Amino acid sequence: MKHGKKYQEAAKLVDRKIQYEPAEAVALVKKTSTAKFDETVEVHIKTGCDGRHAEQQIRGAVVLPNGTGRTVKVLVFAKGDKIAEAEAAGADHVGGDELIPKIQNEGWLDFDVVVATPDMMGVVGRLGKVLGPKGLMPNPKAGTVTMDVTKAVNDIKAGKIEYRLDKANIIHVPIGKVSFDEAKLQENFDTLMEAIAKARPSAVKGQFLKSITLSATMGPGVKVSTAKY
């Protein structure tokens, strides 16, 4: 992949042989951001897990203290008095069976996170082929299958993010925007890393965190020291 002049200049500021302390890494990511838009700051964590084994899977969620800097649209599948509860909590869309053909047949996907009450999972399950590949299926481990709809919606709106292994056993997570000040980005980063460290599967032998890289959407990757975690 050929990178432009701005990227190449920014990349010169990063020593690829060094694992930076989190504070230094955050400062470098901000410094090497050159895009005209407010880039997302992302963390990429290579683990020693083997996701082919169920006992080495990692999936969970954490609320970042300073949010993600983006507006998240929430769809809630609910019925009865939970519909009003979801609407009062600020859900962008609330419904039940009537949303199935809209999503399945019309390709409607105007939402970023799906929450469902447990009694609606039979309905939501019919959307597995659509929502599954996009990582949108509600999941109890992520707190998106719950009767406490108010807490679920509030947490998501406040900056709750999900983390999970991809096929290469890497976790990719946004922790804010380049426009955030360094202290807020580092606080979000520390909160995420504490959650990941606690989520270490007991079945993993050897090194759990093989590498941590921070980067802005269009910027170069900055390696972060794994020693602290």
Image (cartoon, rainbow, N blue to C red):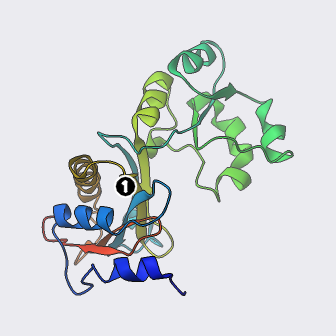
Residue at figure coordinates x 27%, y 54% from the top left: 189
Q: Quadrant of the N terminus?
A: bottom right
Q: Quadrant of residue 125?
A: top right
Q: Amino acid at mark 1?
A: Val
Residue where numbered disc 1 is placed: 178
Q: Quadrant of the C terminus?
A: bottom left
In the image: residue 20, left or right of residue 109: left
Q: Where does the image place residue 7, in percent across and percent down from the top left?
A: 43, 78
Question: Observer-nearest residue: 219 or 188?
Answer: 219
In the image: residue 137, left or right of residue 149: right
Q: How many marks?
A: 1
In the image: residue 218, left or right of residue 132: left
Question: Observer-nearest residue: 206 or 72?
Answer: 72
Q: Where does the image place residue 6, in percent across and percent down from the top left?
A: 44, 77
In the image: residue 107, left or right of residue 42: right
* Circle 1 SS class: loop
Tell which residue pokes out farthest to the left in this image. 228
Q: Where does the image place residue 95, in percent across and percent down from the top left?
A: 70, 26
Question: Observer-nearest residue: 191 or 208?
Answer: 191
Residue at figure coordinates x 23%, y 76% from the top left: 207
Q: Quadrant of residue 197?
A: bottom left
Q: Residues within 10 Å of mark 1 (few under 14, many from 20)?
A: many
Q: Is residue 37 above or below residue 64?
A: below
Q: Where does the image place residue 20, in percent across and percent down from the top left?
A: 18, 73
Residue at figure coordinates x 44%, y 27% from the top left: 154
Q: Is residue 68 above or below residue 174?
A: above
